[in-house]
Amino acid sequence: TPLYSSAASDVYKRQASGKRKAEKKAKESGMPIKAPKGTACALCEKTEGIVFDHDHATLEFRGWLCNSCNRSTGVLGDNVAGILKVLNYLNKSENKKLHVDEDSGEVKIV
């Protein structure tokens, strides 16, 4: 019995192919595909298990994330809309005031 279904296997193959293409694109522009020593995750600031994160649509490098944060963003859809659904869900109980900074585009708690 296979560990994964053929559909899951196809998704994995597409993702691996996309990652290889994104890494090739980065190499061609002179960017490293391995995080420089001491690089911290852009989200949680851990310095272990840092991986190359890329936009799945454009194959552009986005930044360095730890494996946990990279996988978590992927599970949530790997896009702003998916993350926003989670943010809105959590904010039902936390009831924070959110603001989008016009200069940076960052969402902040005010």
Image (tube, grey):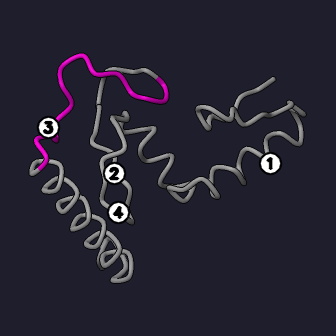
Name the residue: 27% across, 42% down: 52
Distance between the alpha carbons at the discs numbered 3 and 1: 37 Å
Of residue 4 and residue 59, the one placed in the foreground of this image is: 59
How many residues crowd around disc 2 within 10 Å: few (fewer than 14), some, or many (20 or more)?
many
Q: Amino acid at mark 3?
A: Pro
- Assess whether mark 3 and mark 4 are in contact (beta carbons under 8 angstroms): no
Q: Which element is circle 3 on?
A: loop
Residue beneath label 3, please? 32
Q: Is residue 47 magenta?
A: no
**Is 39 above or below relative to 81?**
above
Q: Position of residue 19 (x, y in %)?
A: 24, 58
Q: Which element is circle 1 on?
A: helix
Residue beneath label 1, please? 89
Residue beneath label 2, please? 54
Distance between the alpha carbons at the discs numbered 4 and 3: 18 Å
- Assess whether mark 3 and mark 2 are in contact (beta carbons under 8 angstroms): no
Kindly give the residue lying farthest to the bottom in the view shown.
Answer: 6
First in sequence: mark 3 vs mark 1: 3
How many residues crowd around disc 4 within 10 Å: few (fewer than 14), some, or many (20 or more)?
few
- Magenta-highlighted residues: 29-44
How many residues crowd around disc 3 within 10 Å: few (fewer than 14), some, or many (20 or more)?
few
